Every structure is written in C-alpha cells, then in structure tokens.
Amino acid sequence: MKFTDLFIRRPVLALVVNLMIVIAGLQAIRSLNVRQYPRSENSAVTVSTVYVGASADLVAGFITTPLERSIAAADGIDYIQSQSSLGVSTITARLKLNYDPIKALSEISSKVDQVRRDLPPEAEVPVINVESADTRFASAYLSFTSEVLKQNEITDYLVRIVQPRLSAIEGVQRADILGARTFAMRIWLNPERMAAFNVSPVQVRQALAANNYLAAIGRTKGSFVQINLTANTDLSSVQEFKRLIIREQAGTMVRLEDIGDVVLGAEDYDAEVHFSGQTAVFMGIWPLPNANSLDVIRRVRTEMADIQKNLPGGMDARVAYDGTTYIENAIQEVLKTLSETLLIVIIIIFLFLGSLRSAFIPVVAIPLSLIGAVFLVQVLGFTINLLTLLAIVLSVGLVVDDAIVVVENVERHLGEGQSPLDAALLGARELVGPIIAMTVTLAAVYAPIGFQGGLTGALFREFAITLAGAVIISGLLPSHSRP
C-alpha cells in the first residue's frame, strides 16, 4: 500500500492533518517577524582610539599599527579595515558570516588590553563597539523642523521629551538623533585682540577650567540642621562667560569679551540634515532584531500623533521615511497575485475538465500549501521578507501545476472506467514519486547556493526552503479528496 492510500481510504485522518497544517500555519503567520530583508549575522567590531593633537601619521604609527597587529590574531575575523585621521584611530574588524559577535568582542577586547601599555600615555582608552549589519539603516526616519526655533533648541526638546517616549515603545531598540545640535558655549578667540592684550590661548583655557568647577567640599552640622556644602564656580549664561576675567595686572582686568566673541551654539557643526529644502533634525527608529517591524512602526506612528499635538509653537514633525510601507505594499501584491491565481485556476480547470469538483481541489490545495510553507519558515527561524514573499509567489505556480496534474490523472482513470476510489488510488500512486522527485530536485538545486555564505546565501536559503515546503505539501493534498 502506498503512502497516499492512507489519506484516501481514511478521509477523517486527511481532514485532521489538513486542519493541523492550517493551525500551525496560522500561528506561524501571527508570530513571524516581518522585515524588509532577511536577517544576516554579519557583524563588525569597531575599535576607536582618540589621540588628541597627533597627526594622521603619528596616529597610524603609534596607535593603529600596534592595535591592528594584536586584533588580527583574534578568531572569527574575515578582514580588517583601519582609518587614521587627525587625533583619531578607527579600526573595523569585519567578522565571518554567522560568527558570534559577543565572542568576537570578548577576544578583541582581550587583544586590545594586551597592547594597551604600548600605546602613548596621552592616548585615551580605546572604545570597542559591536555593529550588526541590520543596524546600518533605520526602519523609519522622523523629521523635526521649525522656522522659529534653532537647531540646538529643537535638539534639546527632542532629547528631553521626544526621545524618551519613542525609546520606551515596545520593540524599539533605539531612537537616535541625526543632525543634532547639542547646546554648547562657543568662544571664538580674536588673535589680534589677544596679541594686543598679551593673552595666550593657554591662559584662556586655564581661566575657563578654574571658573567651571563643581565639587562637594563637605558638610556642616548644627543642633538640628545638617547642610551639605558645594563649591560652585560653574558658568551658565553667555553674559557670565563674557564677564569672565582672563588676566588681571596692575588693576587692569582683561575679560573674555575683550579678546573674543561668546555665543551659545552647538558642540559641532560636522553634520547637517535637510528635508524638503529645509534644515531639519532627524530621529531614526531601529526596531529590535526579534521584533515585527510593521507593528513597531505602527506604534511609533501612534505615538507620533500624540507628540504632534504637544509640539512647541512653530515646530513641525512628520514621518520622513517609512521602510515598512514597501513591505506592506509587497504583502498586498502577494495577496492580489494569489487571488488572481485562484480565479484563473478555477476558470481554466473548469473549461478543460468541465467539473466544478475538479476545480475546487486546487483551490483548496493552494492556500493550504502556502500556509504549511509559512510554518516551515517559522521552524527554520526565518522571517517574512521580500525574498520569502517572492518565493511564495513563485511557488503558487508549482502548487497549481502539481494539483492539476494529479486531478487530470484521476480524471483519466475515471474515463477508462475505473471507480472513483480506484481512480484516486491509482492516480495518486502514479504521481507521488514524480512530485517528490521534483521537490528533491529543486531543493538540491537551490540549497547549495543558499549555504555558500554571505547575504546572498541567506536570501536563497529562505527561498529554497519556502519553495520546497510548498511543493512537498502540494504533492499530497490533491489526493485527499475522493472523486
């Protein structure tokens, strides 16, 4: 007795198996993560070292070279990139595909500690970070603009109000500010005035350090009172900085406003963001790796609606870019394609076979096969993304082909005078082997490509497994129905 005979002779068992496939597939659809691209464990470890006042050549010779030699001995590194610029050394170690980034971080940190004593004492402690390939682009970018407020004022509002609210949303890994202008007191020294008053930059720095100091000097106690004492020489306004005394000699005082201009500006002006021709401050939203991007961005949009109601006067906020829109459109196109496929299949089978019952079998087989394939995607730890959606669209044609072939073969045996039960048994027995052979062939063709490594490997692996799962299930479903 063939394997397919069991399902034809026991229709209740076939119905139970089909229901189990549906239940497993539906729970998989609800729990699967939705992403634009497949997740790839292609991480990089970055080692940044600051060496203030050193030229690029000195940084390369005293910082980058010894660190590179030590880091190269760590396991799991594919290749190393380094950049030496004025006062900064940046070394990026690209890890092998699917290598554990935490393990690599530990090993590289140990290698850096081994050569820490060989670095110049003026160099700061190296900072080590791990960056995943998924963290290079945010799922959404929010734009904040204003014709009244300055960029540093917008940044201050985002840091205090907006960023904590968005970071607290379920599924959000981080909400970073792009093009920020953090408040900072900018002092632009005038060389001509400094020469006239005989003031050097070192004196200015010493005066700023001596008058920008916070310390707890102790406490005093009374009979019923205890007071903590604090030495506070901190300057907090532009006017206080302007009146700061730099040098005093023979009753003559040289203040900071005499040798330069003092303005309340930003820490740096290295980056600037524009949106629709207007200077803006962006905020990027990065979902967690195991979070559903569609649900996360949907929550962000809901929170943004509440934030927009309480914005300061003159500030405008909007979603400048939403990467999930393309995913939603792709899902809608897949559903549209499936609907069109079902309609065409019904019409074609009915025209050629002249039986609504024969046309009904592929209509049931197609969605059931795709639902079962989604369950296989969940079992193998993959996600719903553009590549798996493409695989589903392509597999529809294979499912239809297999279903039509089985139905036509059963109809042929009926035309030869066989009883409905015998026709179903013979038709399924004759085609179960070729259909399984087709599945194994497809898996053998696509699987080696998928396991070669790299981002392409991750994409084709999900494609092959999804396609194979749909074909395997489709090969069994048509034989469940008794002609």
Image (cartoon, rainbow, N blue to C red):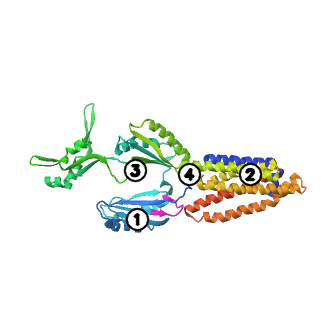
Q: Which residue is mark 3?
A: 273
Q: Nearer the viewer, mark 1 or mark 3?
A: 3
Identity of the amino acid at label 1? Answer: Ser
> What residue is drawn where x is 79% and y is 60%?
431
Give how far across and how far down residue 147 sits, in percent: 37, 42
Q: Is residue 223 above or below residue 350?
A: above
Upstream in sequence: badge 4 or badge 1: 4
> What residue is drawn where x is 36% and y is 64%?
84
Q: Which residue is mark 4?
A: 35
Upstream in sequence: badge 2 or badge 3: 3
| Closer-to-camera residue (326/60) | 326
Q: Is residue 255 above or below residue 437?
A: above
| Closer-to-camera residue (172/282) | 282
Q: Nearer the viewer, mark 4 or mark 1?
A: 4
> Could you tell me which secondary element the residue under label 4 belongs to?
loop
> Could you tell me which secondary element the residue under label 3 belongs to?
strand
**Residue closest to the far right:** 417
| Mark 4 touches mark 3? (CB < 8 Å) | no
CA distance separating discs 4 and 3: 26 Å
CA distance separating discs 2 and 1: 58 Å
Q: The magenta stretch spans which residues? A: 93-101
| Mark 2 touches mark 3? (CB < 8 Å) | no
> Could you tell me which secondary element the residue under label 1 belongs to?
strand
> What residue is drawn where x is 71% and y is 63%?
440
**Residue 345 has which mark?**
2
Is residue 480 magenta-colored?
no
Q: Is residue 326 left or right of residue 483?
A: left
